[in-house]
Amino acid sequence: MRISAVVALTCLAAGACGQTKWRAFSLDGGFRVRIPLSAKVLTLPKTKGNTKQYTFNDPDARIYAIVQSKTVGPLTPEAWMKGILAGIAKHDELEIVDEKESVYHGWARLDLTVTQGDGLVSTTRAFLVKDSLVTLSVQCGKGIKTPADLETFLNPDFPSTVGEGPLTANGPAFRPFPLGTSGISADFPAEPKLHEEGGMSQYAGAYLNRFYAVGYKDWTATSDLTPEQKAQIRL
């Protein structure tokens, strides 16, 4: 399986943000988003392989970027999100300051706020819809937070164009895994790895950049323990 993941991050200075009027903008496959009525094409649409990118700006010097890419083979929400985070990690000047995953009308969604070394901030929403990856990014300038009215751009009208998705919950699906021969099990998002040190057994699993760990150690009643301590230990 080959994973195609694209991150849209704009890197241009911008000015103050004001109120906005909107118009529909159509993408491939029946997708439709809303862009400012006054927005003009900043760069001609770029196509590379199975990816197409559009960039606009408006009179307030805000920068909008739309990236649409087709998946190649089956792609889970976790693998898709890992691809996006790995793409950002390749750039030393970029730092994720806020990250949130969710379900948007049944489709996987990832919200990111990314800062650049020069103080610019990009607000990005990425969606995995059917066999398409759609990334929307907006930047208002140094020290300027994304105003509430830009949610119109960042929350596309997918349900009316491509329908509702199958997802009902975001995040990992946990299932029980046995902890060795202890007779105990713990829930992990994937099969955990075992690490043993100093008589302690630790099982650890991960989902995206989150880690889950469970440790246990077998205790044996010895002559070093007082009767009260022995009574507290169930062997």
Image (spheres, helix red, strand yellow):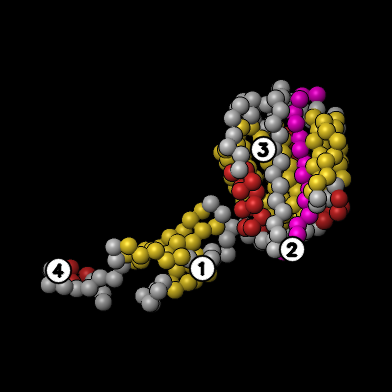
Mark found first going from the N terminus, 3 or 4: 3
- Residue contact at pointers 3 and 4, CB within 8 angstroms: no
Name the front one of labels 3 and 1.
1
- The residue tagged 2 is 73
Is residue 32 or residue 48 the one in the foreground?
A: 48
Mark found first going from the N terminus, 3 or 2: 2
- The residue tagged 3 is 123
Mark 2 lies on a secondary structure that is loop
Per the model, the C-alpha gap separating discs 3 and 2 is 28 Å
- From the viewer's perspective, tell me whether residue 214 is left or right of residue 69: left
- From the viewer's perspective, tell me whether residue 109 is left or right of residue 179: right
Q: Amino acid at mark 4?
A: Leu
Position of residue 67 measured from the top left corner of the image (x, y, whole percent): 77, 44
- The residue tagged 1 is 191
Name the front one of labels 4 and 2.
2
Mark found first going from the N terminus, 4 or 1: 1
- The residue tagged 4 is 225
